[in-house]
């Protein structure tokens, strides 16, 4: 018998086998706003519940799907997943497991929520534009912390900078 030949007699019973689909399982996701008290919440997310809720109100429309079909992930869960990712400096797998979502979804969520938060920057980050504003801001930094010639700070993070050399090189020394 030739393996490449097809049999002309086909059984109709092969065609009548119904396809059995695997039933979808929707994972129950914890509500961390109710599960944790203020201290536990802050220890896990590095933000207070109130701060998260204020931020959620500002970005909810850009991160929430219009429907809840198919076990869609709520905006609150998306925000907390992203904040946990930031707070732990972790990889996606533990964060995805924590939120009860697949890794691919966690990756998309972190990107989308991050973009939504970044879009708020003009509402929250103000830099002096005019010479007068720069001088006033620099004077205020100096008055508060004896910080000379500073017009802005980022989360109290020290950013190492190589000295450009020259006559004023000493002012760049850490």
Image: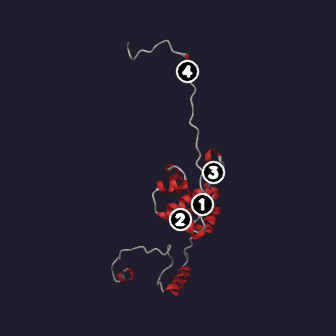
What is the distance, in whole Å, between disc 3 and disc 4 at their CAs?
A: 40 Å
- Helix, strand or loop status at disc 4: helix
Q: Which mark is residue 32?
A: 1
Q: Which residue is mark 3?
A: 65
Quarter occupied by residue 50: bottom right
Which badge, 4 or 2, is on the more N-terminal residue?
Answer: 4
Please give the residue where the numbered disc 2 appears in the rendered image: 44
Q: Position of residue 172 (x, y in %)?
A: 38, 80
Q: Are the residues flagged by discs 4 and 2 in contact, CB closer than 8 Å?
A: no
Cα–Cα gap, marks 4 and 2? 55 Å
Q: Nearer the viewer, residue 164 or 81?
A: 81
Categorize mark 3 by other alpha carbons within 10 Å: few (<14), some (14-19), many (20+): few
Q: Disc 3 to disc 2, how far (Cα)? A: 26 Å
At 64% across and 45% down in the image, what residue appears? 69
Q: Is residue 38 above or below residue 149?
A: above
Image position, residue 97 (x, y; %): 51, 53
C-alpha gap between disc 1 and disc 4? 50 Å
Q: How is the image coloured?
A: secondary structure
- The answer to whether the residues at label 1 and label 4 have Cβ atoms under 8 Å apart is no
Q: Which residue is mark 4?
A: 15
Tell whether 4 sits left or right of 109.
left
Label whose residue precedes the other's in the sequence (2 or 1):
1
């Amino acid at each position: 018998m030739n393996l490449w030949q097809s049999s002309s007699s086909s059984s109709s019973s092969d065609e009548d086998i119904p396809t059995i689909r695997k039933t979808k399982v929707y994972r129950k996701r914890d509500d961390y706003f109710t599960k944790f008290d203020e201290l536990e919440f802050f220890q896990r997310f590095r933000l207070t519940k109130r701060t998260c809720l204020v931020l959620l109100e500002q970005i909810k429309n850009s991160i929430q799907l219009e429907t809840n079909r198919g076990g869609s992930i709520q905006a609150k869960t998306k925000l907390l997943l992203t904040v946990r990712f930031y707070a732990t400096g972790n990889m996606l797998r533990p964060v995805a497991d924590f939120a009860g979502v697949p890794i691919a979804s966690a990756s998309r969520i972190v990107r989308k929520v991050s973009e939504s938060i970044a879009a708020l920057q003009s509402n929250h980050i103000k830099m002096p534009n005019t010479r007068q504003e720069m001088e006033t801001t620099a004077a205020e930094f100096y008055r508060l912390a004896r910080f000379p010639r500073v017009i802005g700070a980022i989360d109290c993070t020290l950013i190492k900078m190589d000295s450009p050399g020259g006559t004023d090189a000493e002012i760049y020394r850490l």
